[in-house]
């Protein structure tokens, strides 16, 4: 067992014991311990890995599958310490069923904090409400943050470097906090640990029908939607949305669900749109190794407003943030036989512009929207408005729609 983690765990235990193991005191105690004796200053990661591989005297390890991998480096009945490696880790927006603190040992992460308001329970494992982003911070090696169990600490982490490594001091569980919800912005909270085996098997069977091209697939899905309750109907729609859209039958399935559930269903369309957007950006990130591009995609996935977006680019790289963003846009432009893409914005076919000319026009329009300079000479006002709408309906919306031209032409841009 690593001596540093034994000392760290012992220090946390003694301090917590002095307050009679009060649950509410643990996050502050864990945070203070990590700040006073930061692992980033004291742990040689290659040595830790070698020690763990070669020495048998280690704490009992879990089989949770959390982390890539997870190493348990200290464990007593009241709490334990884990080292988590992330090769391509992007956590869902979630709350915790435990409390403690985490510390960035190596790499960096984009850390976002949220609030879930106006919550309405559909079942004990499924809620509707309004999820809002409250803050986003860039965490570097040596940074520490508390973990408070329950809905007071809803967050997500987008790990930017490969690998990113964190140290977590945590309780085994805090039963009083309720389900450990995962949040699907902007309106849903679901319990990922809810063991609905029947729905799981039904989704797997539908996947089988999709993969084998069964012609009855859409009729079966619509029949299920007609009969299922709101919660299970949502999970079936979530599972099937991609294939139904490819078949051109999504609208029919959605209308069936909306008729059955009335006003309650109004929260779902923006949630489905965001699920698709986030899956698309996360999928791109999984295929990209360049750390600058991964950072850019992390911002697009997690930052909703222009000002903090530009601030974080400036914090990490210095110089003019917009120039850096335009550089990344050009590097990430994707041209296929079907069209021209800037991340998840596709050049609009309705403009009737030859594909050879699309990349330069796309970049000129983006440059105008980001810098608010003079109108591009090669783009008409009507075409520019179509292009603005294209960007506004994509992940670029945070950068082009938040500020007026006059307020955006500041030094940070």
Image: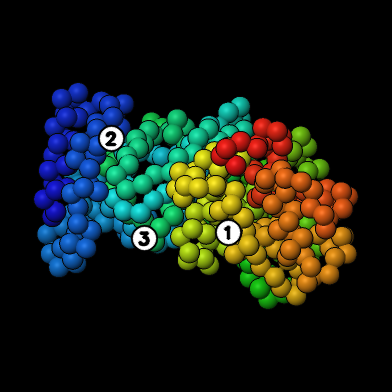
For the C terminus, the quadrant is: top right
Q: Secondary structure at mark 3?
A: loop
Residue at 57% across, 62% down: 284
Q: CA–CA distance between discs 2 and 3?
A: 23 Å
53 shown above or below 366:
below
Residue at 39% across, 51% down: 108
Q: Position of residue 208 (x, y in %)?
A: 63, 70
Mark 1 lies on residue: 328
Residue at 17% across, 62% down: 47
- Dividing the picture into quarters, in which one does residue 210 lie? bottom right
Mark 2 lies on residue: 31
251 shown above or below 16:
below
Q: Position of residue 223 (x, y in %)?
A: 76, 56
40 shown above or below 411:
below
Mark 3 lies on residue: 163
Residue at 13% across, 32% down: 14
Q: As drawn, is 110 to the left or to the right of 84?
A: right
């Amino acid at each position: 067992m690593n001596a540093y983690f034994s000392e760290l765990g012992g220090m946390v235990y003694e301090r917590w014991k002095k307050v009679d193991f009060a649950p509410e005191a643990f996050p502050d105690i864990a945070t203070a311990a990590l700040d006073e004796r930061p692992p980033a200053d004291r742990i040689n990661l290659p040595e830790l890995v070698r020690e763990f591989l070669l020495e048998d005297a280690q704490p009992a390890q879990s089989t949770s599958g959390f982390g890539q991998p997870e190493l348990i480096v200290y464990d007593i009945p009241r709490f334990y310490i884990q080292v988590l490696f992330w090769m391509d880790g992007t956590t869902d927006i979630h709350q915790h069923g435990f409390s403690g603190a985490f510390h960035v040992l190596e790499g960096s992460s984009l850390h976002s904090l949220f609030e879930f308001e106006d919550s309405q329970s559909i079942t004990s494992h499924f809620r509707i409400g309004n999820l809002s982003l409250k803050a986003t911070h860039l965490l570097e090696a040596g940074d520490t943050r508390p973990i408070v169990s329950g809905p007071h600490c809803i967050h997500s982490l987008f790990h930017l470097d490969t690998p990113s490594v964190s140290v977590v001091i945590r309780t085994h569980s805090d039963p009083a906090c309720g389900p450990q919800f995962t949040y699907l912005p902007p309106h849903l909270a679901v319990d990922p640990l809810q063991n609905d085996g029947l729905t799981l098997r039904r989704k797997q069977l539908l996947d089988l029908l999709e993969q084998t091209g069964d012609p009855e697939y859409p009729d079966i899905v619509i029949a299920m939607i007609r009969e299922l309750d709101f919660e299970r109907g949502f999970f079936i729609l979530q599972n099937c949305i991609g294939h139904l859209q490819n078949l051109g039958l999504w609208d029919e399935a959605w209308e069936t669900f909306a008729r059955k559930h009335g006003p309650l269903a109004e929260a779902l369309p923006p949630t489905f749109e965001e699920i698709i957007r986030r899956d698309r950006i996360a999928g791109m990130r999984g295929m990209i190794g360049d750390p600058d591009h991964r950072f850019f995609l992390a911002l697009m996935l997690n930052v909703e407003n222009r000002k903090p977006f530009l601030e974080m680019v400036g914090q990490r790289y210095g110089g003019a943030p917009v120039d850096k963003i335009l550089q990344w846009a050009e590097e990430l432009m994707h041209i296929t036989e079907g069209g021209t893409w800037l991340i998840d914005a596709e050049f609009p076919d309705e403009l009737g512009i030859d594909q050879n000319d699309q990349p330069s026009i796309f970049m000129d329009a983006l440059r105008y929207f980001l810098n608010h300079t003079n109108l591009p000479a090669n783009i008409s006002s009507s075409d520019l408005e179509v292009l603005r709408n294209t960007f506004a309906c994509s992940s670029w919306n945070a950068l082009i729609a938040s500020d007026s031209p006059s307020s955006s032409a500041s030094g940070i841009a």
